[in-house]
Image: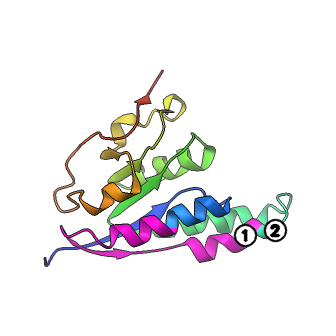
Amino acid sequence: MTDKCKVTVIGSFITEEGRRRIAKAERVVKQNPTVNIEVVTIREEVTKYLKQPIQETDWLEEYLEYFREAIHTVDKVIILTQMPTVALGWVMGYAWAWGKPMLLIVPEPLNLMGFNAIDSITATLKSINDLKKYDFKEMPYIYEGAEVSAL
């Protein structure tokens, strides 16, 4: 295994459960044998902004800057989805605009109609544990996640 791959995991940073899922995905993806994976994490940096009052708009620009920087730095983006959100749409659009392959983890049915992003998704898996076996070297399109629809 000589191929190297930088990935970032982006999901819901708002809840403790969301941060735990991100941490788990970061651990699990490192177990993948197809390439030597380096995880670029923004979990610690982003969490500090969640403690600030939402009315203070300065933090939002910095918060999104961490996402932007992570997407620029990596080869591939792993997105943990549970519901369509503005942040999810922003991340998917930004990653797509920069040509970064996106791997979605979709445990429940999800409607992405508002994002017009279905064609930009490289692969969709159902669970975080599926990251152990996915071929990060070839990045084939596969669909194993829950239903994703545009309707």
Q: Looking at the picture, which amino acid does disc 1 mark? A: Tyr
Query: Quarter-wise, where is residue 143 in the image?
Result: top left
Horizontal relation, residue 91 to residue 117: left or right: right
Q: Which mark is residue 123?
A: none
Secondary structure beneath disc 1?
helix
Res 74 visible: no
Q: What is the image's colouring?
A: rainbow
Place of residue 6 in the rendered image (x, y in percent of width and height, measured from the top left): 33, 72
Q: Looking at the picture, which amino acid does disc 2 mark? A: Gln
Res 112 visible: yes
The residue that mark 1 highlights is 49
Is 42 magenta? The answer is: yes
Horizontal relation, residue 21 to residue 85: left or right: left
Residue count near mark 1 (Cα–Cα under 10 Å), binned few <14, some 14–19, many ≥20: some
Query: Quarter-wise, where is residue 101 in the image?
Result: bottom left
Do callouts 2 and 1 mark residues in contact (Cβ within 8 Å)? Answer: yes
Q: CA distance from mark 2 to mark 1?
A: 6 Å
For the point 43% across and 37% down, the residue is 117
Query: Quarter-wise, where is residue 34 in the image?
Result: bottom left
For the point 36% across and 58% down, the residue is 129
For the point 32% across and 55% down, the residue is 130
Q: Classify 139 as above or below 24.
A: above
Place of residue 50 in the rendered image (x, y in percent of width and height, measured from the top left): 74, 66
Q: Residue furthest top?
A: 151
Secondary structure beneath disc 2?
loop
The foreground one among 53 and 80 is 80
Q: Which residues are magenta?
A: 23-50
Place of residue 15 in the rendered image (x, y in percent of width and height, measured from the top left): 67, 59
Place of residue 118 in the rendered image (x, y in percent of width and height, measured from the top left): 39, 35
The residue that mark 2 highlights is 52
Q: Quadrant of the N terminus?
A: bottom left
Is 39 magenta? The answer is: yes
